[in-house]
Image (cartoon, rainbow, N blue to C red):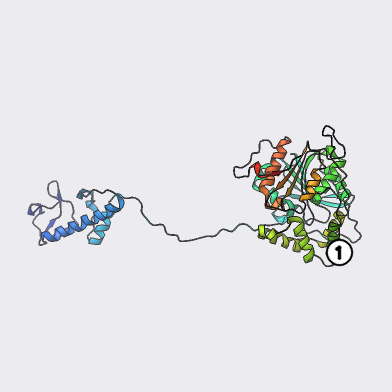
Amino acid sequence: MPAGPGNASGGGSYVSMGTQGGGENVYRPTTVPESATTTGLLDGMKRYFGFARDDADKVGSVSTRTEVVNPSKMPTSGIAEEAALLGTMPSDSMDDIELKNIKLQFPHVRSMSREDSNALEEVVETDRGNVVVAIQGNRNKPAIVTYHDLGLNYVSNFQAFFNYIDMRALIENFCIYHVNAPGQEENAPTLPEDFIYPTMDELADQLVQVVRHFNLKQFIGFGVGAGANILCRYVLNHPEMVSALCLINCTSTQPGWIEWGYQKLNTRHLRSKGMTQGVLDYLMWHHFGRNTEDRNHDLVQVYKSYFERNVNPVNLALFIDSYVKRTDLNIHRDPDPSKKNASTLKVPVINITGAHSPHSDDTVTFNGRLDPTNSSWMKISDCGMVLEEQPGKVSEAFRLFLQGEGYAVHVRRRSSCMSVGSLGTSPK
């Protein structure tokens, strides 16, 4: 530090603020006039040390020795000097974070189009008309055959469920064959006026020709509503072809008078007026139950739009008319559990329904007619259309069911999935 005239360099009119070694100027750029008073120099030092103390209070303990200054980079101006001195102090990054941009990410719109499906469609000719079958997966793997409900097809009934993250890991072990009832596929042309639509038993017989066409030795059935009833009829006649059944909202009895009256009115409107509001309300009730908009308003709007725009009303009327004319499955449980009753389903069955489904009581009746040693009934809470509203719970139940039958034993549940205890079960 400057201590007096002895520190002057040469004989010039300026003296340096500090020297090092044999009088070498250390702070060459920073000089003061020789006439500057001691008070001015002290004011500058006070200004420097006061600034350093303020910074030390912010960033921690800072040495006040003058050696911390980088002498080779001392600025000439007072403001720049303070900035340079501050830059030499050890400090943590205290920069403020400024939010400059916000980008909202909206979820993908629920799509029900065959263009979004990775399945390959194939037309199978049968005695009762052509059937469109969509194949998804490797045909060398075990087969799962699906059948849809009223007003739906393989796209609107199964596409979202089988694309669910937990189901994708499971179906890598299978090949899925989605069967569409005649005239119910996407963009189906109107069936001829003289076309006699197959009965429920004849729709089940169509599956015989579908299975033969794809040379399937055995398959797992996955049906919903009307499709579940059709698969049951097939199993009763060909139990050796089915290794297991997953049925959702399955009805095993003939229709009651109320259902028969509503459905007859629906078919009349569909043929004459198209998709009326009354038919639309009935379809929404059939799939979701009551108070659906309180649970999932967006999903309701998607399906309402789908029924209004993508369903061929004439073809749907024929399918509904066939379903409402269904006969009883004529199966019952033998009171003696030691006996294997031939009048019930002989394959393992998982019977699923939703707590808000209008078909919940029908599934209870159906469960009472099954063999308790190879069947189970599950009611899933907070939903009516279980595949859309609770896909995680259904996929977990389906996975455990298949693993119990020896399939996909290496597939594990994700940690974010629900526990098995969240599924409702009934006593046998």
Crowding at label 1, few (<14), some or many (≥20) Cα neighbours within 10 Å?
some
Residue at (80% x, 58% y) in the render: 188
Count of all numbered marks drawn on residues in the image: 1
Choose between 141 and 259: the one closer to the eye: 259
Q: Specify whether 106 is left or right of 233.
A: left
Residue 157 or residue 117, whichever sits in front: 157
Which quadrant does the C terminus fall into?
A: top right
Judging depth in this view, the residue of 123 and 272 nearest the camera is: 272
Q: Where residue 22 sits in the image (x, y, percent)?
A: 12, 47
* Left or right position of 382 against 367: left
| Picture coordinates of residue 221, whole percent (x, y) | 78, 43
Three-letter code for the amino acid on which mark 1 is drawn: Arg
Q: Of 142 and 355, which appears nearest the observer?
A: 355
Q: Residue 377: percent from the left, percent from the top?
A: 75, 43
From the viewer's perspective, is 169 left or right of 22? right
Residue at figure coordinates x 88%, y 60% from the top left = 192
Q: Describe residue 9's horizontal placement relative to residue 265 as left or right.
A: left
Give residue 121's position: percent from left, percent from top.
77, 51
Residue identifier under label 1? 268
Kindly tell me whether residue 137 is visible in this rendering. Answer: yes
Residue 212 visible at all: no
Secondary structure of the residue carrying tag 1 is: helix
Which residue, as the protein is rendered here, is positioned at the far top? 338
